[in-house]
Amino acid sequence: MRTKTFFGSTALLVLFLVPVWAADLNGKWFAEYQSPDGQTRQSTFTFEVKGDTLMGTVAGARGESPIENGKVNGDEISFSVTRNRGGNNVKFQYKGKVSGDEIKFNVTVGDGDRTFDMTAKRVK
């Protein structure tokens, strides 16, 4: 009986501590990068984390878009953003790894035919 109680208590403790291990993403982040078309672009990310859910916006030269399907798992994050390009909606899928005040992203555009990397840094 003691073993069962010990493992049950340990499992509950781990569930409550997992959010503590998650990276601190709240606030603004900025990235300057080269897009697949060769242009230098800038994006500003505004993140808010609640549990394992990532919310916020991505802003660039063509306006601001809300984050969709945002998730946080330890130091890994993922989300998508839908932008209008010439009358067509195009989905951008972001997958990133957080290390201190830096996030290294791999971004997939549309159906995956174009990808690029970017690094965002926390705005202090």
Image (cartoon, rainbow, N blue to C red):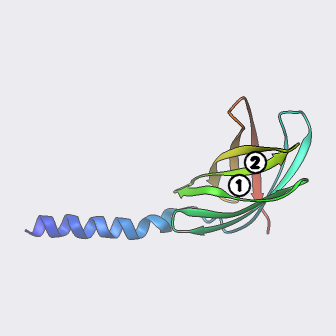
Which amino acid is tagged 1? Glu
Quote the CA–CA distance across marks 1 and 2. 7 Å
Report which quarter residue 122 is drawn in. Answer: bottom right
- For disc 1, the neighbor class at 10 Å (few under 14, some 14 to 19, many from 20) is some
Where does residue 43 sit, x and y in percent of width and height?
Answer: 83, 54
Report how many numbered discs are placed on residues in the image.
2
Q: Earlier in the sequence, mark 1 or mark 2?
A: 1
Q: Residue at the location (76% across, 53% down)?
A: 120
Q: Residues within 10 Å of mark 2 (few under 14, many from 20)?
A: some
Instruction: Return the residue at label 2.
Output: 119
47 displayed left or right of 39: left
Which residue is located at x 89 percent, y 46 percent?
41
Give the vertical position of 41 relative to 71 (above or below). above
Residue at 79% in and 65% down: 123
Residue type, mark 2 in image: Thr
Residue at the outermost left position: 1
**In the rendered view, does 18 fall on the left or right side of 113?**
left
Q: Position of residue 3 (x, y in %)?
A: 12, 64
Find the residue positioned furthest to the top: 113
Question: Which quarter of the image is occupied by the C terminus?
Answer: bottom right
In which quarter of the view is residue 91 placed? top right
Residue 27 screen position, x and y as percent: 72, 69
As drawn, 87 above or below 19: above
Which mark identifies residue 102? 1
Name the image quarter holding the N terminus.
Answer: bottom left
Looking at this rendering, what residue extends furthest in the front direction?
87
Q: Position of residue 97 (x, y in %)?
A: 62, 49
